[in-house]
Image (tube, rainbow, N blue to C red):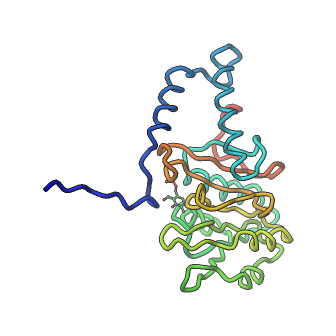
Amino acid sequence: MTRKNVYLDNAATTPMDPKVIEKISSEMTNDFGNASSQHAFGRKARQVVEAARHQLAETINAEDKEIIFTSGGSESNNTAIFGTARARKNIGKKIITTRIEHPSVLNPMKRLAQEGYEIVYLDVDESGHISLEDLKRELTPDTILVSIMAVNNEVGSIMPLKEIGELVKDSNAYFHVDDVQGFGNIEIDVKDMNIDLLSTSAHKVNGPKFLGFLYEKNGLKISNLLLGGEQ
Ligand SMILES: Cc1ncc(COP(=O)(O)O)c(C=O)c1O
């Protein structure tokens, strides 16, 4: 009798969809130009990148220019958190998050605490949800960032993003959502939910393990972690 292994760990990562592999291989073969180059190869590559950006923006009701490609969820989370902390330290040094965030959120928080930021970790109840009352109480004028995940990677709790967004909208803080587990599984409307920053990762939704995007609301002021060209 032959034994067949069944893969049941899709929250950790998903197999790549053959259509994605085919599309990526074909683009890497045919459209290898530098998307910032002015010649035909560059312009073709730029078209492909912009079409992808538009498609992704539509999924969360964002503008195309608000989508920044990254290497995945960890880079998106680090960029959102450190970028906000560095850019807004003169406004305040308080950041609110939860006890059940992914390490790519919790470790940046730990580092910022060492640098003198005040990090408040909201507790969750037995079903993995925060209390909106706790959040409301902690949202003082010196709070510069609220970072709360959309869906927890261990227990699957879905956070009340719309209600959180309503509270954060009336404060001085930016609202960052780690949507790595939610993207493709729950509906997100960044405008309706008043989300300022949102992280995603392709390998959770049948894409490659080197890609993601950070949604950054138009007009937001966050510091770049990587300094380089305009691309
Ligand atoms: C909730 C959550 N955030 C962030 C990440 C990190 O994403 P990536 O593996 O793309 O760096 C993961 C990955 O497991 C995750 O589950």
* Image coords of residue 15 (percent x, y): 41, 48
Report the front residue among 178 and 81. 178
Q: Give the side of residue 20 with respect to residue 140, left or right.
A: left
Instruction: Say above or below: 57 vs 114.
Output: above
Instruction: Say above or below: 150 vs 5.
Output: below
Image quarter for residue 2?
A: bottom left
Residue at point 62%, 69% (across, down): 113
* Image coords of residue 103 (percent x, y): 51, 64
Residue at point 69%, 20% (across, down): 43
Image quarter for residue 65?
A: top right
Report the front residue among 8 and 173. 8
Q: Quadrant of the C terminus?
A: top right
Instruction: Say above or below: 121 vs 126.
Output: above
Farthest residue, direction right: 170
Q: Give the side of residue 143 with respect to residue 78, left or right.
A: right
Q: Give the side of residue 11 with respect to residue 201, left or right.
A: left
* Image coords of residue 22 (percent x, y): 47, 32
Image quarter for residue 81?
A: bottom right
* Image coords of residue 205 (percent x, y): 52, 51
Residue at point 72%, 49% (across, down): 223
